[in-house]
Amino acid sequence: MRTIKEIVKSQRDFFNTSQTLELSFRMDQLRRLKSGIQAHEEEILNALKEDLNKAHFESYGTEVGLVLEEICYILKHLKDWAQPQKVRTPLTSFPAKSYIYPEPYGVTLIMSPWNYPFMLSLIPLIGALAAGNCAVLKPSAYSAHTSAILSMILRENFSEDYIAVIEGGREVNHALLEEKFDYIFFTGSVEVGKKVMHAAAEHLTPITLELGGKSPCIVDQDANLELAAKRIIWGKFLNAGQTCVAPDYLLVHRQVKENLISRMCQVIGDFYGENPLENPDLPKIINDKHFERLLGYLSSGRIRCGGTSHKEKRLIAPTLLDRVQWEEPVMQEEIFGPLLPILEFESLDEVIRLVNNRPKPLACYYFTQSKEKEEELIRRISFGGGCINDTVIHVASSHLPFGGVGESGMGGYHGKASFNTFSHRKSIIKQSLKSDIPVRYPPYKGKFYLLKKIMK
């Protein structure tokens, strides 16, 4: 078994053969990845069931299906993206022509989390391969079954000199970050993201950080409450709330608060049954540490529905917490679980002030029927991305870049944004040999006025 250092060296040697630069090679590898996924679809779904108790429907809709869609989208557009882009040339460089050449960085490191362990491993990998890179993938040790399937699929279909999967815990992460990579893509917590960024700085390695934070969901007094209740409950309790873009807390106008809470409690019953802990498709909390952490939040505010749990199965019923105060523990960090704190407001200005006084969130959701108010919120609050009158669905589009801002991350991916993330844009001017403009050369006497006229 080769060491991490040997794997990185072998990938650098393979990259230096220039084989990955060929468009046909990249497209063939993406097709091979798609075939490998399809051949092991049932095993992937079963692994996700083992790790997180996800229903096959949820696993396909939020993980496997999104990965296959991303491959198809990139295969359709990659030829155009990979072409040199001609741009305008300033008059001072006449008669030259200017181009931007996308080129791969080289050997990349992709570190993925446990909450969507299949999708958040492969969608960045797809971008790295599409751009012509080699890749080392480090999946999470917490989602061991899915990591094992990922490893099997990639080892069956690709040489380790091109794509390597390295499993393990913190010691492996530390060893990987000691190596010099040409690009690092990390998805995970803010705390670990800071450590990854610090390690990348030692080698001046460019980096994308996909982090998280407390993403607000705002329901104004003019919202369609029936739809809001369904869409908030769906987005919040998908994967038991273990979603980086899940609504982390609810800000609801005081005039419609009771009506909305009543509707949301009804929707929870409709979705998960009278006793959600008996629902075979209720996703579980990833480990005991997170389970106990989440139980500690139940003392915040007043439980309006839910609040029950099953320790052996690591299940927590979808829970709404009313009368929560900003200083309570549940409001101090990202919840990452099936608990939704509820706070109230009286004006949009108040909402904007409250959200802007906190770190920039990864997502923001606003329910309203007013075009003017939705545009005001989008303009005045900085966040990674979001939805108007829905939750979470913006992350499922290959047409939209996905990423954070401020403490919720840096950089973006999905679709063309993935290709751009894993590509260096090389600027080239091709100058003509047929003519030469003498004005730029010394001596400069008598040329100053002409220069100012050209560069106005």
Image (cartoon, grey):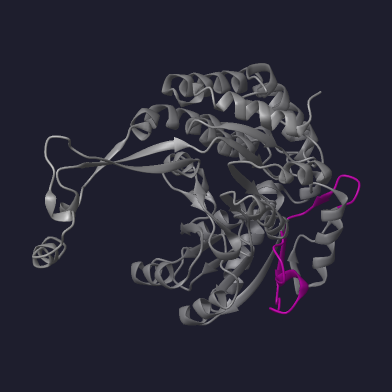
Return the x and y of residue 145 as percentages of the image width and height.
78, 32
Return the x and y of residue 55 as percentages of the image width and height.
69, 36
Return the x and y of residue 423 as percentages of the image width and height.
46, 40
Return the x and y of residue 12 as percentages of the image width and height.
61, 30
- Mark yes or no: residue 146 visible: no
Residue 321 included in the magenta stretch of the image: yes
From what the image shows, is residue 234 above or below residue 21? below
From what the image shows, is residue 184 above or below residue 151? below
Residue 412 included in the magenta stretch of the image: no
Residue shown at the point (54%, 74%) measured from the top left: 256
Residue shown at the point (63%, 65%) measured from the top left: 214
Q: Which of the pair 443/367 is nearer the observer? A: 443
Q: Which of the pair 334/82 is nearer the observer? A: 82
- Mark yes or no: residue 1 visible: yes
Question: With 389 as the anchor, is 358 left or right in this view?
Answer: right
Residue shown at the point (71%, 76%) measured from the top left: 324
Please report the bounds of the magenta region as a residue range: 310-335
Residue 15, image quadrant = top right
From what the image shows, is residue 146 above or below residue 410? above
> How many numbered circles does the render carry?
0
Furthest residue to the right? 312
Residue 406, image quadrant = bottom right
Furthest residue to the front? 443
Question: With 86 as the anchor, is 170 left or right in this view?
Answer: right
Q: Which of the pair 176/404 is nearer the observer? A: 176
Question: With 328 as the anchor, is 256 left or right in this view?
Answer: left
- Image quarter hosting the C terminus: bottom left
Main SS, magenta residues = loop
Q: Which of the pair 439/290 is nearer the observer? A: 439
